[in-house]
Amino acid sequence: MSKHGFNSDERPVVTYVQDPELAYIIQRYRETHDAIHTLLGFSTSVEEEIAVKWFEMNELGLPSAALGSFFGPLALVRKGIMKGGDFKSLGNLQVFISHILKCIEKKKNKDGTEFFMNIYFEKEFETDVNDLRERLGVIQFDK
């Protein structure tokens, strides 16, 4: 995670959520999000964030991930229009989402994979990242 500058301890505490259980779920989602970035091998570009949202939408089923998945590409359309019709970032997104679909298929066909919100990633810091990917059914994106 440090390669990408991620530190889950630096995530802000959830505010404006009255229910402590729901606040914990949202906090855990924020922390898990950084681990998902690392496992998938994605950085924080807009296209790669959207691809991570696609993975989260499938894996976690959270409405915020679905919103980011479907409406995030509109930011890329706007960016392309502002650049005079340069829609390269949409092409990149297509490549990233194709990779996510392969991950989803692999995870679906692999027995015993864990639900990501239930994984104590803090206990996995000493685990080789490639071993962890294999165990969880995640494929790293090769850039």
Image: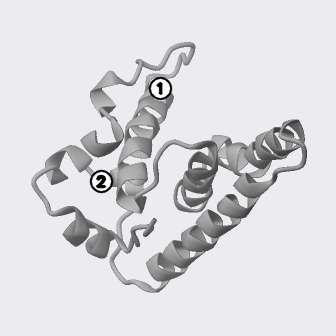
Say which residue label 1 marks.
Answer: 23
**Foreground residue, 54 or 117?**
54
Work out how far the residue at label 1 is from the one at label 2, CA to CA, in angstroms. Answer: 18 Å
- The x and y percentages for residue 114 are 35, 66
- The x and y percentages for residue 97 are 63, 66
Residue type, mark 2 in image: Ile
Residue type, mark 1 in image: Ala
Task: Judge from the rendering whether residue 89 lies leftward or rightward of residue 74; answer left or right.
Answer: left
- The x and y percentages for residue 142 are 43, 69
- The x and y percentages for residue 11 are 38, 24
**Foreground residue, 17 or 64?**
64
| Above or below, comparing residue 59 to residue 53 in the picture | below
> Who's the residue at 56% across and 43% down the image?
45
| Above or below, comparing residue 134 to residue 15 in the picture | below
| Above or below, comparing residue 101 to residue 83 in the picture | below
Few, some or many residues within 10 Å of mark 2 (<14, 14–19, 20+):
few
Which circle marks residue 119 in the picture? 2
Q: Secondary structure at mark 1?
A: helix
> Who's the residue at 26% across and 40% down the image?
2
Indicate the quadrant where residue 96 lies.
bottom right
Mark 1 or mark 2: whose residue is earlier in sequence: 1
